[in-house]
Image: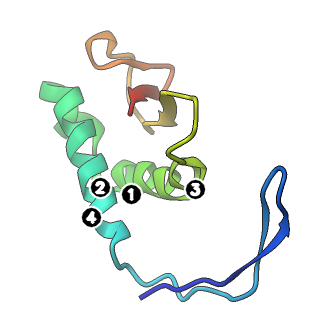
């Protein structure tokens, strides 16, 4: 289990400081990553196997985990996020352009 402790440095806007170092074990987050992968595979359809090669898939999930998940808040007014899909050609029907896919919550 990965447990972190944060210190609230400022309230408006919220600023947190990490008080502990997590051990980065997969706990519940692995289920979020699997659902994300499933959603991307569904969007890519027939292109999924060509685009989601193991190395590229690993990089895509790492980017999702490190950059998209930490920004997510229920009160976030942004309804969609663009994330990197390494190695992907433009696939208009899947919303992939210039190596990025736009996905709505």
Q: CA distance from mark 4 to mark 3?
A: 15 Å
* Picture coordinates of residue 88, whole percent (x, y): 38, 30
Q: CA distance from mark 2 to mark 4?
A: 18 Å
Looking at the image, is mark 4 or mark 1 earlier in the sequence? 4
Q: What residue did someone put label 2 on?
A: 54
- Tell me the residue that label 3 is attached to: 70
Seen at 39% across and 27% down, the residue is: 104
User: Which residue is located at x 60 percent, y 49 percent?
Assistant: 71
Spot the residue most to the front.
11
Q: Residue 14 vs residue 42: left or right?
A: right
Q: Secondary structure at mark 3?
A: helix
Q: Which quadrant, please, contains the N terminus?
A: bottom left
Q: Is residue 17 left or right of residue 38?
A: right
Callout 4–callout 1 Cβ contact below 8 Å: no
> For mark 4, what is the residue?
31
Identify the mark nearer the N-term, 2 or 4. Answer: 4
Of badges 4 and 1, the one in the foreground is 4
Q: Which residue is mark 1?
A: 58
């Amino acid at each position: 289990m990965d447990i972190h402790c944060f210190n609230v440095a400022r309230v408006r806007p919220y600023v947190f400081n990490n008080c502990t170092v997590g051990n980065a074990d997969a706990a519940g987050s692995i289920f979020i990553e699997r659902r994300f992968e499933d959603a991307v595979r569904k969007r890519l359809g027939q292109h999924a196997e060509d685009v989601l090669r193991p190395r590229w898939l690993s990089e895509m999930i790492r980017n999702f985990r490190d950059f998209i998940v930490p920004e997510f808040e229920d009160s976030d007014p942004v309804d969609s996020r663009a994330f990197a899909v390494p190695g992907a050609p433009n696939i208009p029907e899947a919303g992939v352009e210039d190596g990025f896919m736009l996905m709505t919550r």
